[in-house]
Every structure is written in C-alpha cells, then in structure tokens.
Image (cartoon, rainbow, N blue to C red):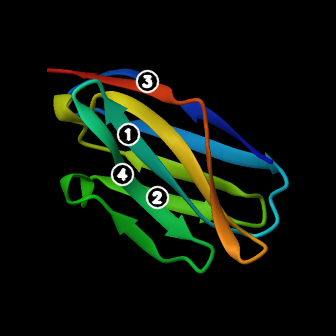
C-alpha cells in the first residue's frame, strides 16, 4: 500500500497564494505519476495538475498559468503552488499517486485538504 500525506491548504482571500505538499510512503516502488485532484459537493472529482516521473505535466484549463506542479520522485513528493486564487478554486484537494503493479496500474489517494478562497 501507498500512504499519501498532504499538507498545506487553508483559507485565503481571492488573488492570494497557497502551497500544497504531498509525500508518499510505504510501497512506493513503481510510482510513475502523482498529482492533485479537487472536489466540491456540486462537482465530481476533477484533475487539477499532474506530473509524471519523466517530468511531463498537465493542468486543468481552469488553472493553467496560475498553478505550478513540481515533483521529486526520488523522495516521492510533489508540490502544488497556487497563485491568483479565485473563489471557484474552493474545494477539497486530494493527492493522488499512480503506481504500476504487476502489469496493472493502481491509484492511491490522500485524505484530502480543504482550500477556501474568499471573494
């Protein structure tokens, strides 16, 4: 099993910045990508940003130019820097790790951390 520990998040005024960190422990062999997803009561969980062990990143259109994801796969950790935050970014943010397991892929999830952006 992979355990994901998240930190960061909280409350910020619109236009402000926050940083989210996530570190994986346990059976971390085979992790090939990590990322952040978010969910609100009104919407399904959606991808925010993701980075592969090869350094490829992808972002939701709504956060491009405002959020930056970086990763250190030697330490199995990622960082999401969120700038110019908007009230629409308010959500529970979940760290995700995708790992290869004997020919299949498994997803692991953190507990989630609340991000609240006031208008």
| Separation of residues labelled 3 and 4 (CA atoms) | 14 Å
Residue 102, position as x, y percentages in the image: 79, 74
| Separation of residues labelled 3 and 1 (CA atoms) | 9 Å
The mark lying in front, picked from 2 and 4, is 4
Residue 93, position as x, y percentages in the image: 44, 36
Label 1: element kind: strand
Label 3: element kind: strand
Q: Is residue 9 visible?
A: no
Is disc 2 in contact with disc 1, using a CB cutoff of under 8 Å? no
Is disc 3 in contact with disc 1, using a CB cutoff of under 8 Å? no
Q: Which residue is mark 1?
A: 38
Quarter of the image with the C terminus in it = top left
Classed neighbour count for the residue bearing mark 2: other residues with Cα under 10 Å, few (<14), some (14–19), many (≥20): many
First of labels 2, 3 by sequence position: 2
Q: Nearer the viewer, residue 111 or 57?
A: 111
| Separation of residues labelled 2 and 4 (CA atoms) | 10 Å
Q: Residue at x 59, y 30 (%)?
A: 111
First of labels 2, 1 by sequence position: 1
Q: Which residue is mark 2?
A: 69
The mark lying in front, picked from 3 and 1, is 1
The mark lying in front, picked from 2 and 3, is 3
Q: Quadrant of residue 16?
A: top left
Classed neighbour count for the residue bearing mark 4: other residues with Cα under 10 Å, few (<14), some (14–19), many (≥20): many
Left or right, residue 72 beside residue 69:
right
Q: Which residue is mark 3?
A: 114
* Numbered circle sitting on residue 48: 4
């Amino acid at each position: 099993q992979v355990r994901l520990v998240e930190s960061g998040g909280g409350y910020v005024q619109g236009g402000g910045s926050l940083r989210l960190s996530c570190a994986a422990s346990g059976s971390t062999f085979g992790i090939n990508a990590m990322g952040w997803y978010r969910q609100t009561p009104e919407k399904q969980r959606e991808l925010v940003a993701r980075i592969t062990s090869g350094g490829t990143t992808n972002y939701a259109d709504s956060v491009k130019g405002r959020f930056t994801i970086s990763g250190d796969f030697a330490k199995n950790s990622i960082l999401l820097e969120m700038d110019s935050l908007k009230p629409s970014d308010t959500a529970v943010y979940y760290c995700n790790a995708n790992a290869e397991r004997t020919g299949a892929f498994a997803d692991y999830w953190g507990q989630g951390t609340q991000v609240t952006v006031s208008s």
